[in-house]
């Protein structure tokens, strides 16, 4: 049925059809990034339209993250029960509903409702899309497939920044939100043609459909040799419960996934994604009216640097890239601290360079690789719930960082604040060095066997 493309890796090859599957599924990332970032340009118009106080303004921004929390927490159980594909479809529909509520909102409360609902779909997609991508990818391409999710997030952010610039003059904030429903509608149509993941199908005893999906997705016969292994790991067992996450053989992977997910946020990426113009204004490099342009530039750097990870992840490995990236993040933040604390003539230039280096290092490491590792380290029986737990923490700390950043700036000053994030980044480097093993090139079934034998460390 599917046309085949000869793309060789060590053993596996993926079909042209699986590229279509990859693009449609990872569009969830585009919606994530778009709805996450669009508010930065729409906010001032919403504030004027509904006469918002500073507090209400902050709440319109942060309620999306609360929706994200709710979405992430519920995604795991329903993705295990109903299947990954169904949850992606539901998520697409919720994205459309949320965008339409925002487009037509005639009161502050309608805005809050719309933001919470889109937040829920962002939370759902952050769990189910990487899960889906990891389960349809051939082992030697898994890193790159899941990385495409991060690429789509960065593209979504960039698109939102571009739309913000485009619609800013006419103050068309409603159109900014309406635009977000279009990729969701296209994705919903595309999703009809996607298979459920082979792992989920096998786990639910639907072996013929699982084999059909594998035939369509793969252009090699390698997977046939691993069938007994796949069937064994996926064999229907008792339903994975939340309690199971804390059993001794799973505790370690649950713990490191949880922490990695937190580090992705508390190293401060969203302070740059949201406050880049403010940071540059403080250095005096950028005038206030250049803010949208600077933000767009950060978006471009963020998006392009993700390709470094896509290119290297399955060659160099997750661990090395993570270590290089987090070390670079720490160094960039220390340099930024220096730029703020010293009175050197080149400080402004150093501040800009260090923010750019920070974004590059994040985009090639903690950004994408967190999704990759979360989607591959958990055994199938706990996978949905364990990713949901880690992503719950991710959204929670995203919320904490966005709430506390301005307070930190006020109390510690810019130098102190970035020094604090720099220290956290050094701790994340040490955590990765001591706790995260390499998973490059191993099939999900191999990783599962290693984890359940307690040999993952
Ligand atoms: C993070 C987001 C962040 C984005 C930036 C994602 O991996 O989860 O919080 O805004 O990367 O590109």
Image: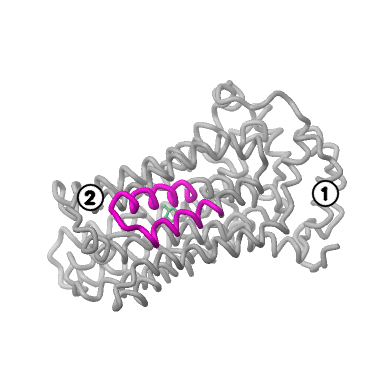
**Badge 1: few (under 14), some or many (20 or more) residues near its Cα, within 10 Å?**
many
Q: Position of residue 370 (x, y in %)?
A: 51, 48
* SS assignment for the magenta stretch, majority: helix
Residue that badge 2 annotates: 56
Q: Position of residue 341 (x, y in %)?
A: 16, 58
The quarter of the displayed image where residue 384 is located: top right
Q: Position of residue 180 (x, y in %)?
A: 47, 64
Q: Is residue 60 above or below residue 234?
A: below
In the image, the segment drawn in magenta is 93-122
- Going 84% across and 57% down the picture, which residue do you hit? 220
Q: Which mark is residue 7?
A: none
Q: Are marks 1 and 2 in contact (CB under 8 Å)?
A: no
State yes or no: residue 120 in magenta. Answer: yes
Looking at the rendered structure, the secondary structure element under dot 1 is: helix
Question: Does any portion of residue 385 appear in the rendered image?
Answer: yes
Q: Which mark is residue 223?
A: 1
Q: Nearer the viewer, residue 204 or 457?
A: 204
Q: Is residue 31 above or below residue 450?
A: below
Q: Is residue 225 above or below residue 141?
A: above
- Going 16% across and 48% down the picture, which residue do you hit? 412
């Amino acid at each position: 049925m599917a046309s085949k493309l000869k793309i060789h890796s060590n053993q596996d090859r993926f079909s042209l059809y699986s590229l279509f599957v990859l693009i449609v599924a990872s569009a969830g990332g585009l919606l994530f990034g778009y709805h996450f970032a669009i508010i930065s340009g729409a906010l001032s118009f919403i504030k004027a339209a509904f006469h918002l106080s500073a507090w209400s303004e902050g709440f319109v921004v942060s309620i999306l993250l609360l929706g994200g929390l709710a979405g992430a927490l519920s995604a795991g159980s329903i993705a295990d029960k109903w299947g990954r594909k169904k949850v992606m479809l539901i998520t697409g529909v919720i994205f459309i509903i949320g965008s339409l509520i925002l487009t037509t909102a005639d009161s502050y409360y309608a805005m809050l409702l719309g933001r919470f609902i889109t937040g829920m779909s962002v939370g759902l997609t952050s769990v189910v899309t990487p899960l889906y991508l990891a389960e349809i990818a051939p082992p030697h391409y898994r890193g790159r497939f899941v990385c495409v999710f991060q690429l789509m997030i960065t593209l979504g952010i960039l698109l939102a920044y571009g739309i913000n610039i485009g619609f800013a003059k006419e103050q068309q904030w409603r159109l900014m939100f309406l635009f977000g429903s279009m990729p969701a509608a296209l994705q919903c149509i595309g999703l009809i043609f996607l298979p459920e993941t082979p792992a989920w199908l096998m786990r639910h005893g639907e072996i013929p459909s699982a084999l059909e999906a594998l035939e369509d997705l793969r252009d090699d016969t390698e997977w046939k040799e691993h069938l007994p292994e796949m069937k064994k790991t996926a064999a229907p067992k008792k339903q994975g419960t939340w309690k199971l996450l804390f059993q001794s053989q799973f505790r370690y992977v649950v713990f490191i996934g949880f922490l990695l997910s937190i580090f992705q946020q508390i190293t401060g990426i969203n302070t740059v994604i949201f406050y880049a113009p403010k940071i540059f204004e403080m250095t005096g490099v950028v005038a206030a009216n250049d803010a949208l342009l600077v933000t767009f530039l950060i978006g471009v750097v963020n998006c392009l640097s993700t390709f470094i990870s896509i290119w290297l992840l399955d060659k160099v490995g997750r661990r090395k890239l993570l270590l290089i990236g987090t070390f670079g993040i720490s160094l960039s933040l220390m340099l930024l601290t220096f730029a703020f604390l010293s009175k050197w003539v080149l400080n402004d230039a150093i501040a800009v360079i260090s923010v750019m280096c920070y974004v590059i290092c994040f985009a090639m490491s903690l950004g994408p690789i967190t999704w990759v590792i979360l989607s591959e380290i958990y055994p199938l029986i706990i996978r949905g719930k364990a990713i949901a737990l880690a992503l719950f923490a991710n959204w929670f700390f995203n919320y904490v960082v966005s709430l506390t950043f301005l307070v930190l700036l006020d109390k510690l000053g810019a130098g102190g604040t970035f020094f604090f994030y720099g220290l956290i980044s050094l701790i994340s480097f040490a955590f990765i060095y001591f706790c995260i093993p390499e998973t490059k090139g191993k099939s999900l079934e191999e990783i599962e066997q290693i984890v359940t034998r307690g040999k993952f460390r």
